[in-house]
Image (tube, rainbow, N blue to C red):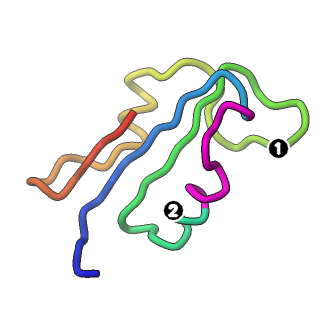
Amino acid sequence: PGDNTQISLIDSNHSFGDILMYEELVQFAKDNPNQLKLWFALSSKPDDREWSYSVGHLDQKMMEDHFYLPEGDKVGTFL
């Protein structure tokens, strides 16, 4: 409570099964849309589910598109 730090997280993995805590992260991002900007990237699209996130390697454009812009000391970025 009272902490408005904004966190950007790009979780890049080989396959969907490699993502740790996927459901929990997605739910936390839904519950805190102004504080957690969440994005996933996989090496290849999963065959067994819809995938609306990135496929391929993490690159500069992906970071520019999915990170909060730095604003003082209230923004954290995690890769």
Mark 2 surroundings: few (<14), some (14-19) or many (≥20) residues within 10 A: some
In the orientation shown, which residue stands out farthest toward the right? 48
- Give the CA distance from mark 1 to mark 2: 19 Å
What's the residue type where badge 1 is placed? Glu
Q: Main secondary structure of the magenta part?
A: helix
Residue 41 in the magenta stretch? The answer is: no
Q: In the rendering, which numbered label is found on residue 29?
A: 2
Residue depicted at 74% across the width and 34% down the height: 17
Residue on which disc 1 sits: 50
State which quadrant residue 48 falls in: top right
Q: Classify 23 as above or below 44.
A: below
Residue depicted at 29% across the width and 81% down the height: 1
Mark 1 surroundings: few (<14), some (14-19) or many (≥20) residues within 10 A: few
What's the residue type where badge 2 is placed? Ala
Residues shaded magenta = 17-26
Q: CB of mark 1 within 8 Å of CB of mark 2?
A: no
